[in-house]
Amino acid sequence: MKIDATDKKILELLTINGRMSYVDIAKELGLSRVAIRERINQLMEEEVIEKFSVVINSDKIGKKVSAFFEVDCEPTSLVSVAETLAENPKVASCYQMTGPSTLHMHVLVEDFDQLEHFINEELYALKGITRVESHILLRRFKSRSGMKL
């Protein structure tokens, strides 16, 4: 699928407000509601749009501690460790990375007791992990909730 300027504008508008209606997007772009619906459906079918979601302020729902982890694994354990971590509800994101660490992970928990429990009982308990480095978030200046085209 070739993404044209109209598709880019639709994606830009949806990145700002994922709940924007077909009608409002159509008005913004000077197209019909049906044309916008068809384009969005095509973007979804081609997996340009992976999913629609909501961005939640973790602090407002009691997840006061945000920590980032660099995790090294034995090569034969990488996939099983990553899949296990990805299923953990405390893990907000988990990526395989190049560089000095194998996995990069973001964890959200209510307090430092939960963080300690996660590290000692859930992370260190996994077979194949060779090194863990953690970083505690002090203040967020920007976070990704879409991308600029």
Image (cartoon, rainbow, N blue to C red):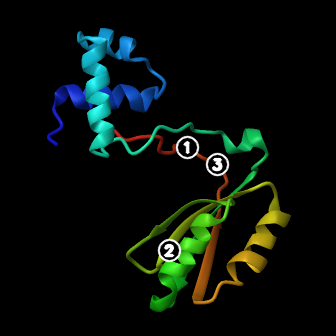
Q: Nearer the viewer, mark 2 or mark 3?
A: 2
Q: Which mark is residue 141?
A: 1
Amino acid marked by disc 2: Leu
Position of the N terminus, as image quadrant, is top left
Dot 3 and dot 1 residues touching (CB under 8 Å): yes
Where residue 72 sits in the image (x, y, percent)?
52, 83
- Judged from the image, the secondary structure of the residue bearing numbered disc 1 is loop
Going by the numbered disc 1, the residue's amino acid type is: Phe
Q: Would you place residue 113 above or below residue 46 in this image?
A: below
Residue 115 image position (x, y, % from top left): 77, 66
Query: Sequence-wise, which precedes: disc 2 or disc 3?
Result: 2
Q: Is residue 80 left or right of residue 1?
A: right
Position of residue 111 measured from the top left corner of the image (x, y, whole percent): 82, 58
The earlier-in-sequence mark between 1 and 2 is 2
Residue 16 falls in which quadrant of the image? top left
Rounded to the nearest angstrom, the CA distance separating label 2 from label 3 is 23 Å
Query: In the picture, residue 136 is in which quadrant?
Result: bottom right
Q: Which residue is drawn at the image coordinates 32% and 22% (left, top)?
A: 37
Q: Would you say the residues marked 2 and 3 are in contact, meaning their CB atoms lie under 8 Å apart?
A: no
Q: Is residue 32 visible?
A: yes
List the residue tagged with mark 3.
139
Q: Residues within 10 Å of mark 2 (few under 14, many from 20)?
A: many
Q: Nearer the viewer, residue 116 or 25?
A: 25
Q: Is residue 122 above or below residue 59?
A: below
Q: Secondary structure at mark 3?
A: loop
Kindly identify the amino acid type of the residue bearing the numbered disc 3: Arg
- Neighbor class of circle 1 (other Cα within 10 Å; few <14, some 14-19, many 20+) is few
Residue at image coords 38%, 12% = 24
> Label 2 belongs to which residue?
103
Which label sits in the foreground, 1 or 2? 2
Q: Secondary structure at mark 2?
A: strand
* Of residues 88 and 9, the one drawn nearer to the viewer in this rendering: 88
